[in-house]
Amino acid sequence: MRGIIGKTIQCPHCGHHIPVNLDTSLGSEEFYDDCPACCNPIHFNLRVDERENTIELDVDADDEQYF
């Protein structure tokens, strides 16, 4: 399961489709990257579970309020 995985995500700000490469060899991580179309930051939360052999990716604008 270790390696580079290609995904296409949708920017939570403008809806632009963006191809991203995820390096699963580092395990789970959170990081930010800017949308190439609208330049707003996108929050990525990558979870790698090696026991279950699963990868989950959550993408959000990180400006959402939780109540």
Image (spheres, grey):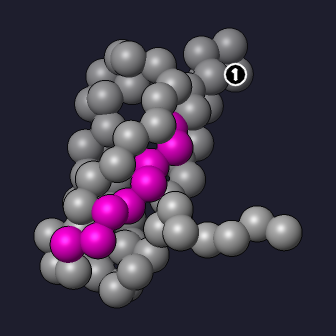
Question: Could you classify mark 1 by the number of other residues whose Cα lies within 10 Å: few (under 14), some (14-19), or many (20 or more)?
Answer: few
Q: Is residue 4 left or right of residue 65?
A: left
Residue at far left of view = 36
Q: Is 13 above or below relative to 66?
A: below
Based on the picture, tell me whether residue 5 belongs to the magenta stretch: no
Secondary structure, mark 1, is loop
Q: Which residue is located at x 37 percent, y 73 percent?
A: 11
The answer, for residue 46, to whether it is visible in the render is: yes
The percent position of residue 47, horizontal first and vertical second, equals: 57, 33
Residue identifier under label 1: 52
The amino acid on which the numbered mark 1 sits, given as a three-letter code, is: Glu
Q: Which residue is located at x 62 percent, y 22 percent?
A: 49
Quick one: 60 or 17, which is closer to the camera? 60
Q: Is 60 above or below relative to 6?
A: below
Q: Is 43 above or below relative to 35?
A: above
Image quadrant assignment for residue 13: bottom left
The answer, for residue 18, to whether it is visible in the render is: no
Q: Which residue is located at x 38 percent, y 17 percent?
A: 26
Residue at far right of view = 67
Q: Main secondary structure of the magenta part?
A: strand
The percent position of residue 48, horizontal first and vertical second, equals: 55, 26
Quick one: 61 or 59, which is closer to the camera? 61
Quick one: 4 or 30, which is closer to the camera? 30
Residue at far bottom of view = 14
Q: Is 8 above or below relative to 40?
A: above
Image quadrant assignment for residue 43: bottom left
Q: Where's the C terminus, which quadrant?
A: bottom right
The percent position of residue 62, horizontal first and vertical second, equals: 52, 62
Q: Is residue 22 left or right of residue 43?
A: left
Q: Which residue is located at x 29 percent, y 81 percent?
A: 16
Specify the segment rendered in magenta.
Answer: 39-46
